[in-house]
Amino acid sequence: MEKRKLAPVVAVAVCFLFALCSVAWAGIEPSPWKPEINKLNAVENNLRSIHERITRVLATPPDPWTPSPNVNGVVGRLSAMENQLLLVNGMLVSVMDEVLGNPPDPFVPEDMLPALEGVRAASQGIADSINAYLTPPPDPWVPAAFINALTNVGIASQNIADDAVQYMSGGGCTPGVWCGCLGTATSCDAFANPTLCNAQAGCRWSDAIPGSCIGTPTSCSALDSTTCGSQAGCRNGICVGGTCQ
């Protein structure tokens, strides 16, 4: 008998809650950029997967006293990661080209900024992990082929992070004011002498690998106005018409 009395009460409560939820849902407008946001989320997932693989590689670097397939196998995996990062960067550029149009609109839709930040954080995480391993230079027994392949992965991931930062900072700056350090830092292996090598933040001249500049250069976006100009490949950005140039 008690169950029969409770049934109408429960039914009324359910209807009341459904009505409240309907009102709340009615006020939420879906983002018109949802497909593009989903693509950026997929880019972030790819980057995080690569970071997991990089972490495993750095935990057990190749041993030069092990037969060459060990070294070659790791270098091959790193080369595959670099190629994947180039494809991921292409996905990022393609999505943002769709959003910004041609000619590009400097203002990225606000509801896309969290997805772009996810891409930036994931790619910067890869670059930071590699840079931490390479600075200071690793033990001299670590094969040069491994260092070079790892450096290339670091550069490719840093490029993605820099691109994401530039997309996020494309609008909203104050005209005539310094708005960030732009460009892509010159890779360490481009320097042929120790003076230029050591002047590039994130790079070190290697005694273990004679005649080699190793490391991952500090990204332009991480530099302030006083250090930006001294980093090869970087330049100080000035806001022009709401765009950092």
Image (tube, rainbow, N blue to C red):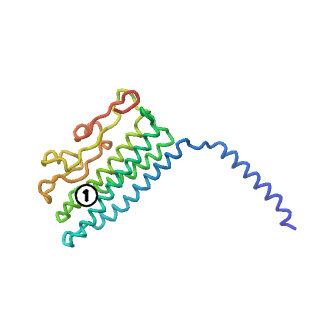
Give the quadrant of the N terminus. bottom right
Relative vertical location of residue 169 with respect to residue 175 in this rendering, above or below:
below
Relative vertical location of residue 126 with respect to residue 107 in this rendering, above or below:
below
Residue, disc 1: 149
Q: Residue at x 38, y 51 (%)?
A: 88
- The residue lying furthest to the bottom in this view is 66
Relative vertical location of residue 175 with respect to residue 2 in this rendering, above or below:
above
Compared across the picture, whether 11 is left or right of 84 comes to right
Q: In front here: 85 or 192?
A: 85
Residue 79 at what x, y percent from top left?
Answer: 29, 58
Compared across the picture, whether 106 is left or right of 234 comes to right
Number of on-image labels: 1
Q: Residue at x 43, y 40 (%)?
A: 97
Where on the picture, by quarter, is residue 83?
Answer: bottom left
Q: Could you tell me which secondary element the residue under label 1 belongs to?
A: helix
Give the quadrant of the C terminus. top left
